[in-house]
Image (cartoon, grey):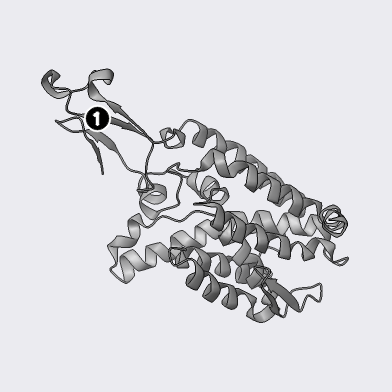
């Protein structure tokens, strides 16, 4: 326990992030907040780019991500890097990962002619974590980090970490978003190339803060954050011809957004 507390103090940003993700888990559980091409690109629900990354499907999903997050906290404990570098890079990956994921969806939908990917939904902090793994695997990354633990199971060479994690995640959690993880890895490799090296930590964190405020406000106004409920139409006053056979639904089941219409029998139609 003493070792754990000492490690938590040595990586304060990681500790705060872990606590925040754990606290947000019950608040966002069973909310329709997933990142999908249809919701973000077609319906302009940009807030999903942020909220989807801090939501998790279940406790196993959360536990895997917290374990990986804690392992990457080694960046904070590395004297050459430190907490400010960790915060700047995390903010960059948080902004870039959904963009790269949506780009992959776009290519699959329009170039590979796979329209089903328009409604594929992704949630979780995994994108940022895979971005970090890809970044640390680059020979150009400073800090001299050569080994990383994978989900607390075993330490592997840093260059193999993202690919080993991708395989393990796919085997243990078949429903995991392969495209989302790959998008995070591409974001990490992009940062590793030094593309954003000219940006100061203050500028990146400021941009992240304003984006989080704006998109957080938009998310708070969204009906998708209302828990999924079902009310008899006789109570809601929306039954067809007073028959009371219809239902009114609020919230969502992860369908990825879209316009909502009430059908003749009171059913919810999305599209």
The quadrant of the picture occupied by the N terminus is bottom right
Image spot of residue 208 (x, y percent): 65, 47
**Residue 63 seen in render:** yes
Image spot of residue 96 (x, y percent): 57, 58
Residue that appears at 81% across and 54% down: 8
The quadrant of the picture occupied by the C terminus is top left
Image spot of residue 33 (x, y percent): 46, 45
Residue that appears at 51% across and 52% down: 58
Does residue 4 appear left or right of residue 236 in this picture? Answer: right
**Residue 215 seen in render:** no
Q: Is residue 68 above or below residue 138?
A: above
Secondary structure under badge 1? Answer: strand
Image spot of residue 253 (x, y percent): 37, 45
Residue that appears at 64% across and 40% down: 210
Q: Quadrant of residue 86?
A: bottom right
Q: Quadrant of residue 160?
A: bottom right
Residue at the limit of the structure toward the front, as seen here:
1
The one of 156 and 269 positioned closer to us in this rendering: 156
Q: Which residue is mark 1?
A: 247
Q: Residues within 10 Å of mark 1 (few under 14, many from 20)?
A: many
């Amino acid at each position: 326990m003493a070792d754990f507390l000492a490690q938590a103090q040595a990586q304060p940003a990681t500790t705060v992030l872990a606590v925040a993700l754990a606290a947000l888990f019950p608040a966002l559980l069973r909310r329709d907040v997933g990142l999908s091409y249809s919701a973000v690109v077609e319906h302009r629900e940009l807030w999903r780019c942020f909220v989807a990354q801090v939501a998790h499907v279940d406790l196993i999903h959360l536990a895997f991500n917290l374990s990986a997050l804690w392992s990457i906290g080694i960046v904070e404990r590395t004297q050459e890097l430190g907490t400010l570098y960790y915060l700047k890079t995390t903010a960059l990956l948080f902004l870039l990962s959904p963009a790269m994921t949506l780009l992959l969806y776009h290519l699959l939908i329009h170039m590979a002619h796979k329209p089903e990917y328009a409604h594929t939904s992704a949630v979780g902090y995994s994108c940022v974590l895979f971005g970090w793994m890809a970044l640390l695997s680059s020979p150009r990354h400073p800090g001299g980090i050569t080994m990383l633990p994978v989900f607390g199971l075993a330490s592997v060479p840093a260059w193999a970490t993202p690919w080993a994690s991708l395989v393990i995640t796919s085997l243990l959690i078949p429903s995991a978003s392969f495209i989302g993880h790959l998008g995070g890895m591409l974001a990490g490799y992009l940062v590793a190339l030094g593309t954003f090296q000219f940006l100061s930590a203050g500028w990146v964190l400021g941009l992240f803060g304003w984006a989080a405020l704006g998109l957080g406000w938009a998310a708070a106004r969204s009906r998708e954050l209302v828990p999924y409920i079902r009310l008899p139409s006789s109570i809601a006053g929306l039954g067809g011809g007073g028959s009371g056979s219809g239902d009114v639904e609020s919230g969502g089941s992860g369908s990825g957004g879209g316009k909502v219409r009430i059908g003749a029998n009171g059913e919810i139609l999305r599209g």
